[in-house]
Amino acid sequence: MNTGLTTQELQTKAKEIRRHVIRMLAKAGSGHPGGSLSATDLLVALYYGKLRHDPQNPKLPERDRFVLSKGHSCPALYAILAEMGYFPISELDTLRQLGSRLQGHPDMKRIPGIEISSGSLGQGLSVGAGMAMAARIDGLDYRVYVMLGDGEVEEGQVWEAAMAAGHYKLDNLCAILDNNGLQIDGPIHDVMSPLPLLEKWDAFGWHVIHIDGHNMAQILEAYDRAEAIKGKPTIIIAKTVKGKGVSFMENQVDWHGKAPTPEQAEKALAELI
């Protein structure tokens, strides 16, 4: 569903999604703001500018597939799905509440638009590679997009999937790395460095695109370039800022998995006008 929004309109939409994220987490009293906010621009550009999908027919066979491997960042995805009509916007207020289908990690059995239950880090790329292989076997032309966290790519299963995707030349597979440089315990280069990222993915047989993950024009161009690549999968390494858009959250590891207080939420929302 390419909505035809301009880059400026996409930037405005991203602010709206960030406001939803802040409100949802403040009401829930728990959740993950840092990675949700860093991934927002990448998700908005994908859903509003590139992904083939239909909120009125979530299981459309020819739809593109999206896997949020870093499932803890689902507040941003939930907000986009609600805004696009997959479920009522009012339901965002139920995030992480008992009985809500909007759990702390996505549930494919309960939420329309969710392709795979995720959150056990390291598994999403394997699922995405399987979906891409299935498209080839079934003779379908859908594309598969998988969003990874750069702390997540310390997981060995990611590299097994990367090796398999490269080996089978899955050019209908595009990974998106939310490269904000932080994970729950600190900077990635201190905890368990996955660097150098570009050289490693290239060595595994992937086409590598490096962009500013908050520049809408660059993001859209990267999605177009990825679609044009033949004979190998593509990874978009998007340099992002954890907590993007909220000054006191930006580049602060403490905001990986901590909800804002009502007062902090009010301050954050004032910055997202």
Image (cartoon, helix red, strand yellow):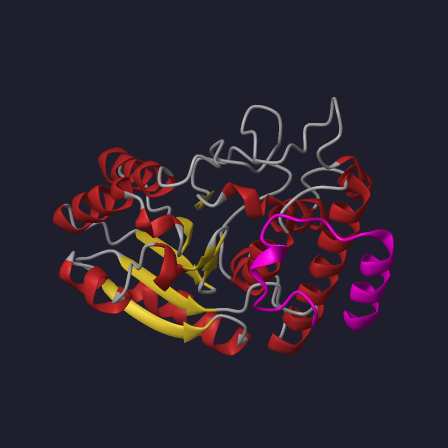
Q: Nearer the viewer, residue 183 or 68?
A: 183
Q: Does residue 96 lie above or below 218 as drawn?
A: above
Decide if residue 153 is on the left or right side of residue 243.
left
Viewer-nearest residue: 166 or 170: 166
Q: Position of residue 44 (x, y in %)?
A: 59, 60
Res 132 quadrant in image: top left
**Quadrant showing the C terminus:** bottom right
Q: Which residues are magenta?
A: 247-273
Q: How many marks?
A: 0
Quarter of the figure with the N terminus: bottom right
Task: From this view, report whether residue 248 is shown above or below residue 183.
Answer: below
The percent coordinates of residue 65 (x first, y second) are: 44, 43
Residue at figure coordinates x 34%, y 70% from the top left? 225
Residue 189 placed where, x, y %?
Answer: 35, 63
Of residues 245 and 87, the one nearer the viewer is: 245
Q: Residue at x 65, y 46 (%)?
A: 75
> Please, is residue 268 above or below residue 163 in the view?
below
Q: Quadrant of residue 41?
A: bottom right
Q: Residue at x 62, y 25 (%)?
A: 110
Instruction: Tell me which residue sits at (56%, 29%) in the image.
Output: 107
Residue 94: % across, % down: 78, 35
Q: Is residue 2 visible?
A: no
